[in-house]
Amino acid sequence: MEEKFAPDSTQKFVDLESIQDGIVTLRGGPLRAVVMVSGVNFELKSEEEQDMIVSAYQNFLNSLDFTIQIIVHSRKLNIDRYLEKMRGVHEQEGNPLLKNQLSEYISFVQGFVKENEIMTKQFFIVVPYEGIGFTDVKKGIGDVFSFLSKKKKSAQQTQETIDQKRSQLRQRVDSVITGVEQIGLRAVSLQDDELLELFYNLYNPETVEKKLSSIESTQKK
């Protein structure tokens, strides 16, 4: 299913034209895919493990013959649903001692979160495909797709069908996922619903954010 964005709404300020089959089409035709990557606590690794990770990361970057954008998205962790579940457990608990401990635990978590913002980080790699004959314009990163969204066309540009462009982009995504997995990280290409939720969260940071289904499935592994 293809999601289109109305040109006469506030969405006209967003550089998105459509999302279909896990591929984002920007205005003017450039394509993007977004790969979500798991994190690793680098500081807890031994010096030898750190060296291996750094070396694998260097090899991954050197293996690419196209530009990528790495995004670290930080957001406040919302635990309302977790607390609601714990209250349900508290109400059903028949043991007075455990019931009291649950009550104290819920109060502790509420107080801790109130005084200390708990942040969660998500890691994404944006994989672009412009088409044959396009070259990158060197530019700083302004927002999630800024330096990847504007390209310069060369005189040797040839026409490609949309299917050919999508096929080339998927090959790039496969290369990125393979390279990331060789570092020892998990990677998955976001699909339509997950992309919509991601963009909703990015453009509505003050609202209660939805959870990406891929994050939940990754955490269960």
Image: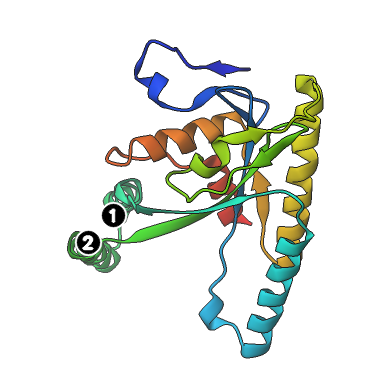
Left or right placement of residue 73 versus residue 78 in this view: right
Q: Which circle marks residue 20 in the picture?
A: none
Residue at 32% from the left image edge and 41% from the top image edge: 205
Residue that lies at the very extreme toward the bottom in this rendered image: 47
Position of residue 55 measured from the top left corner of the image (x, y, whole percent): 72, 76
Residue 152 percent across, percent down from the top left: 63, 35
What separation in Å lies between label 2 and label 1 (alpha carbons)?
A: 7 Å
SS class of the residue under badge 1? helix
Label 1 near label 2: C-beta < 8 Å?
yes
Residue that badge 1 annotates: 90
Residue at horizontal 52%, vertical 81%? Answer: 43
**Residue visible at 61% across and 17% down?**
2
Q: Residue furthest front?
A: 155
Query: Residue tagged by mark 2?
Result: 103
Which residue: 47% across, 43% down? 144
For disc 1, the neighbor class at 10 Å (few under 14, some 14 to 19, many from 20) is: some
Q: Amino acid at mark 2?
A: Ser
> In front here: 134 or 112?
134
Position of residue 28 in the picture relative to residue 200 (left or right) = right
Question: Which sits in the foreground, 80 or 32?
Answer: 32
- Residue 216, horizontal then vertical, whole percent: 54, 48
Residue 90 location (% of width, % of height): 28, 54
Residue 103 figure quarter:
bottom left
Quadrant (top left/top right/bottom left/bottom right) for the C terminus: bottom right
